[in-house]
């Protein structure tokens, strides 16, 4: 018994090897340039949005308050995965210490949970604005908005602590190669050499609590919005109401559909190149497009930007 424990301790994985997106040197150089540009663009876009919201009184509204929180989240979110992706593109194999891998999982799961609840808070804000316009100043007063935002930022880490603790407590005794560009839950569970039923149960319960719960709130909000819009007498009013929701619906649809496709399957499913490509969409492409989608047709943001650039 003692000998087996000693062997287990000796063979315990001390680091993981990330295969990244490509093994070809020429392809990696081109991808590095592309993703570095996208990373800088994401940081620039979201920093600009936060600056505009903080510096212009006309944008001090609940909708823009949540948008500012989302921009801050996107910068944190992409900064958890993108450096790992870039390092992997600079070298053929990216070696990640066990502790660093677990920390990355904790941060990633935390921010995924925060994003889910923040998107549902934004859907609720649109519901109150369209379905209960007379009560909007009361229902979405600053204290309520701050409470919803704080719940989003604290809820994700609380769930992630439990989930990550279960993953870290598993035994990893080899192999230690992850077919991914960052430490994700499913690839790690697939490498565990112990029984993962309890961890999968915790993973399932946390998904129900955060992911499905926030999705149901968002869907219920938009069902109510749809009913209210179709009851509006004028086509102009309907178009105006829908235009305030269109950007959020697009971002929410892309994010939830990608996450559902990747994480709705069994946790120990083999990692594939398709999984990595889809992960690129919701970890890189979505944060890149979100600021553009939210601000492209927003006249108030356009006005604030022109004012900032002194081009009125």
Image (tube, rainbow, N blue to C red):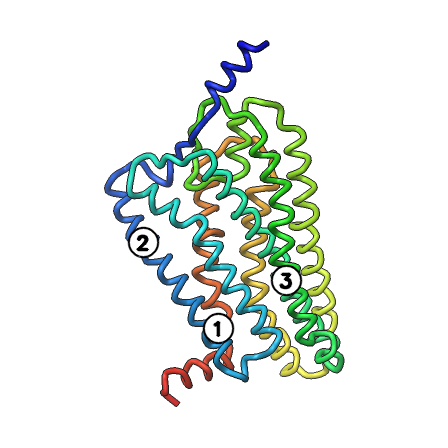
Q: Which residue occupies 71% across, 59% down? A: 217
The span from disc 1 to disc 2 (Cα, nearest Å) is 23 Å
The answer to which of marks 1 and 2 sits earlier in the sequence is 2
Secondary structure of the residue carrying tag 1 is helix
**Number of the label disc, if any, that sits on residue 295:** 1
Residue 100: image x %, image y %?
45, 39
Residue at numbered disc 2: 34
Secondary structure of the residue carrying tag 2 is helix
On the picture, is 164 further left or further right than 216? left
The span from disc 3 to disc 2 (Cα, nearest Å) is 34 Å
The answer to which of marks 1 and 3 sits earlier in the sequence is 3
The span from disc 1 to disc 3 (Cα, nearest Å) is 24 Å
Residue 105: image x %, image y %?
52, 42
Secondary structure of the residue carrying tag 3 is helix
Q: Is residue 27 above or below residue 269?
A: below
Q: Nearer the viewer, residue 265 or 128?
A: 128
Q: Answer yes or no: do the residues labelled 3 and 2 have beta carbons within 8 Å?
A: no
Q: Nearer the viewer, mark 3 or mark 2?
A: 3
Q: Is residue 197 above or below residue 160?
A: above
Q: Nearer the viewer, residue 23 or 149?
A: 149
Residue at numbered disc 3: 150
Q: Which residue occupies 37% across, 39% down? A: 20
Tally of numbered discs: 3
The quadrant holding residue 289 is bottom left
Q: Which residue occupies 54% across, 49% down? A: 258
- Screen quadrant of the C terminus: bottom left
- Screen quadrant of the N terminus: top right
């Amino acid at each position: 018994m003692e000998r087996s424990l000693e062997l287990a301790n000796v063979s315990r994985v001390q680091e993981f090897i990330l295969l990244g997106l490509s093994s070809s040197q020429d392809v990696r150089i081109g991808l590095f340039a592309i993703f570095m540009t996208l990373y800088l663009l994401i940081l620039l876009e979201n920093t600009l949005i936060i600056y505009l919201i903080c510096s212009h009184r006309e944008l001090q509204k609940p909708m823009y308050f949540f948008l500012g929180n989302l921009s801050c989240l996107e910068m944190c979110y992409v900064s958890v995965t993108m450096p790992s992706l870039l390092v992997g593109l600079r070298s053929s194999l990216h070696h990640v210490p066990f502790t660093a891998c677990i920390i990355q999982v904790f941060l990633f799961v935390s921010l995924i949970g925060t994003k889910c609840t923040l998107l549902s808070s934004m859907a609720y804000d649109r519901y109150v604005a369209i379905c209960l316009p007379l009560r909007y100043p009361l229902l979405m007063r600053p204290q309520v908005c701050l409470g919803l935002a704080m719940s989003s930022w604290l809820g994700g880490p609380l769930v992630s602590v439990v989930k990550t603790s279960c993953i870290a407590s598993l035994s990893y005794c080899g192999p230690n190669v992850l077919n991914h560009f960052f430490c994700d839950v499913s690839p790690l569970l697939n490498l565990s050499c112990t029984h993962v039923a309890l961890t999968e149960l915790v993973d399932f319960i946390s998904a129900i609590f955060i992911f499905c719960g926030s999705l149901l709130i968002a869907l219920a909000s938009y069902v109510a919005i749809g009913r209210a819009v179709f009851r509006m007498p004028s086509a102009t009013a309907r178009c105006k109401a829908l235009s305030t929701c269109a950007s959020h619906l697009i971002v929410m649809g892309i994010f939830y559909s990608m996450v559902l496709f990747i994480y709705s399957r069994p946790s120990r499913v083999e990692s594939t190149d398709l999984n990595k490509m889809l992960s690129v969409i919701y970890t890189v492409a979505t944060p890149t497009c979100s600021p553009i989608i939210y601000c492209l047709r927003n006249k108030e943001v356009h006005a604030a930007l022109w004012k900032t650039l002194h081009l009125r």
